[in-house]
Image (spheres, grey):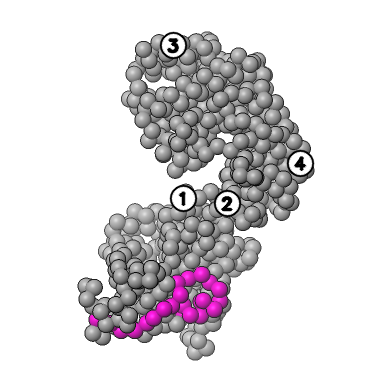
């Protein structure tokens, strides 16, 4: 559709810039409009045959605005292109589609986004359906039976498809006499926009399926998110807590229908999505154990989550907890997702930023608060003893808030650990020479730690940070370091790709030779993604021989000190 077809839109002369948009799968032509006054708007242009449905969508946006659901506000509606097209002019929502933003968000942020999305959907569903609608089962199967027949005739068989079809055939009665309401029409993460301030808005309303009205739980059956914290949040947000058992039976039904009927659509209309849709079928079968259970395990495993906010930022806990004492250190600007069981926060006070680690709150990973408090209390002396230019600087440590807190100077360095995929990818893209410098900084710190009598326990890639602006290595999270020789069992701690045999052996001695093993594993993590094969090693093979020796299961074959490891490494560099 050419721009000239828009010239009969009222106030067309106010359009300073018209930018075509190719996102989304609808047949609408979409444009980002910049007006001469500097405002941005969304223009959607459709075939005139869709006039009635587009008019209904436009009127729906007015109703949605009254309900307080954040969405594009209606500006103008009418015909254009000489009466051949219908247009909607809406306010522009700036931000990123939620489906692309979710993978980079913390689990807490994902869950909080789901809570908002679910609450918005519940408000949308408060709009009643017309009184004269036929029963939902009748309306639903008039459409879906045709799609299921298409799968039986032209679909691609997959393992378990007979079980899925049998469940659908045997449970049709679940849909009889279901309540009906106004639906969004295509409610999923791709039709939600998250802005820089973390607010969420709803876009792309549709009347295609069932004329925009149906069972309210039907739209939750589209919850195919691979981001399970988000999916749980959406369910909790919708029901304001756990849903009734009846929901899960229908969720299984709608999930199965959506999965299996999408196969024929992908086969003919979107082959690039075929593998993804096929995986959805396997996911549904796995979620419901071939329909021998009704509640998927991912919900049971992560459903007991409490979200509370501090300074507008979500914190994931198991139960409510008074966090007001945190303001002693400043205003919270960031919550860091940690599996240690500690609560980790970025705070700002009097223009200076700090990192606060607190033990004693019922975080999602805190099974024994007393143990966590004892460990964090003991860690304060470790940071004091091992003060070093490459180690984060401990400012304060104290009993507070019914637990214990350690306070460090804030660093803008980014973590190289696998739990932080965006930062890790950025780190792994650094030149090899820079990563070599980082590794040598890490060995230098651990030579200092060995000299002070400490063995590295639970050091792994998440303990490594890099300040890209200053080109500086920063080491953090050395809370479990112990005075050597150390005899104990800490096998439950640590990354499997970093720990030495003695760290997971009851009663084994851990000492500087253990730290040598950790440094060898660190080298493989920094240079070859933890692949220990010579084919993946990107540096000189003499350096490979040095670190390969360091990770020997036989302690006697390793370098016997960090200084020896450094000497052999530097000799190989030369």
- Which element is circle 1 on? helix
Q: Is residue 483 left or right of residue 434?
A: right
Q: Are marks 2 and 4 in contact (CB under 8 Å)?
A: no
For the point 34% across and 17% down, the residue is: 541
**Residue 71 on the magenta segment:** yes
Q: Nearer the viewer, residue 558 or 314?
A: 314
Label 3 packing within 10 angstroms: few (<14), some (14-19), many (20+): some
The quadrant of the rendering that contains the C terminus is top left
- Which element is circle 3 on? helix
Residue for badge 1: 103
Q: Is residue 510 visible?
A: no
> Looking at the image, is 129 positioned above or below residue 566?
below
Q: Which mark is residue 568?
A: 3
Q: Is residue 390 visible?
A: yes
**Residue 359 on the magenta segment:** no
C-alpha gap between disc 2 and disc 4? 24 Å
> Looking at the image, is 352 positioned above or below residue 259?
above
Task: Residue 473: give x, y in percent of width and height.
Answer: 49, 29
Residue 399: name its quadrant: top right
Q: Earlier in the sequence, mark 3 or mark 4?
A: 4
Query: Magenta part of the protein: which range?
Result: 60-81
Q: Nearer the viewer, residue 325 or 350?
A: 350
Q: Nearer the viewer, residue 276 or 448?
A: 448
Q: Earlier in the sequence, mark 1 or mark 4?
A: 1
Residue for badge 4: 400
Task: Residue 179: give x, y in percent of width and height.
Answer: 55, 79
- Which element is circle 2 on? helix
Q: Nearer the viewer, residue 238 or 344?
A: 344
For the point 71% across and 54% down, the residue is: 320
Of discs 3 and 4, which sits in the foreground? 4
């Amino acid at each position: 559709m050419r721009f000239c077809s828009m010239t009969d839109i009222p106030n067309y002369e106010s359009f300073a810039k018209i930018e075509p948009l190719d996102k989304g799968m609808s047949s609408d032509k979409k444009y980002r409009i910049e007006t001469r006054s500097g405002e941005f708007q969304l223009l959607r242009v459709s075939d005139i045959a869709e006039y009635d449905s587009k008019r209904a969508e436009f009127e729906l946006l007015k109703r949605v605005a009254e309900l307080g659901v954040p969405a594009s506000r209606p500006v103008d509606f009418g015909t254009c292109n000489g009466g051949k097209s219908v247009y909607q002019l809406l306010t522009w929502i700036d931000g990123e589609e939620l489906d692309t933003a979710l993978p980079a968000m913390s689990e807490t942020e994902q869950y909080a986004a789901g809570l908002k999305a679910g609450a918005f959907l519940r408000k949308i569903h408060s709009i009643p359906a017309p009184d004269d609608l036929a029963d939902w089962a009748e309306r639903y199967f008039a459409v879906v039976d045709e799609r299921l027949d298409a799968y039986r005739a032209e679909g691609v068989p997959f393992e378990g498809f007979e079980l899925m079809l049998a469940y659908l055939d045997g449970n049709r009665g679940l849909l009889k006499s279901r309540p009906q309401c106004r639906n969004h029409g295509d409610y999923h993460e791709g039709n939600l926009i998250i802005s820089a301030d973390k607010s969420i808005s709803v876009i792309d309303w549709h009347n295609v399926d069932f004329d925009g009205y149906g069972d309210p739980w039907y739209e939750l059956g589209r919850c195919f998110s691979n981001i399970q914290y988000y999916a749980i949040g959406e369910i909790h947000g919708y029901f304001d807590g756990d849903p009734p058992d009846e929901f899960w039976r229908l969720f299984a039904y709608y999930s199965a229908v959506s999965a299996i009927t999408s196969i024929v659509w992908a086969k003919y209309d979107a082959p690039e999505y075929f593998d993804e849709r096929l995986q959805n079928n396997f996911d549904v079968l796995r979620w419901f154990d071939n329909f021998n259970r009704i509640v998927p395990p991912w919900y049971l495993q992560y459903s007991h989550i409490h979200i509370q906010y501090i300074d507008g930022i979500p914190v994931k806990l198991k139960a409510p907890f008074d966090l007001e004492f945190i303001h002693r250190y400043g205003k919270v600007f960031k919550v860091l997702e940690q599996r240690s069981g500690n609560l980790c926060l970025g705070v700002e006070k009097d223009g200076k930023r700090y990192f606060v680690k607190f033990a004693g709150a019922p975080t999602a990973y805190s099974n024994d608060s007393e143990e966590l408090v004892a460990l964090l209390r003991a860690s304060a002396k470790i940071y004091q003893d091992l003060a070093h230019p490459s180690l984060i600087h401990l400012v304060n440590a104290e009993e507070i808030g019914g637990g214990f807190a350690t306070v460090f100077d804030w660093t803008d360095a980014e973590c190289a650990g696998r739990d932080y995929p965006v930062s890790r990818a950025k780190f792994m893209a650094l030149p090899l020479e820079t990563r070599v410098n980082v590794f040598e900084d890490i060995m230098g710190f651990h030579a200092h730690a060995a000299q002070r009598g400490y063995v590295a326990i639970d050091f792994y890639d998440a303990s490594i940070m890099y300040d890209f602006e200053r080109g500086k290595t920063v080491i953090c999270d050395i809370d479990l370091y112990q005075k050597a020789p150390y005899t104990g069992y800490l096998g439950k701690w640590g990354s499997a790709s970093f720990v030495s045999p003695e760290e997971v052996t009851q009663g084994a001695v851990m000492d500087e030779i253990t730290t040598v093993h950790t440094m060898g594993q660190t080298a493989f993590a920094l240079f070859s993604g933890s692949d220990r094969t010579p084919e993946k090693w990107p540096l000189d093979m003499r350096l490979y021989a040095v670190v390969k020796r360091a990770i020997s299961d036989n302690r006697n074959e390793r370098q016997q000190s960090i200084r020896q490891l450094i000497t052999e490494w530097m000799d190989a560099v030369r």
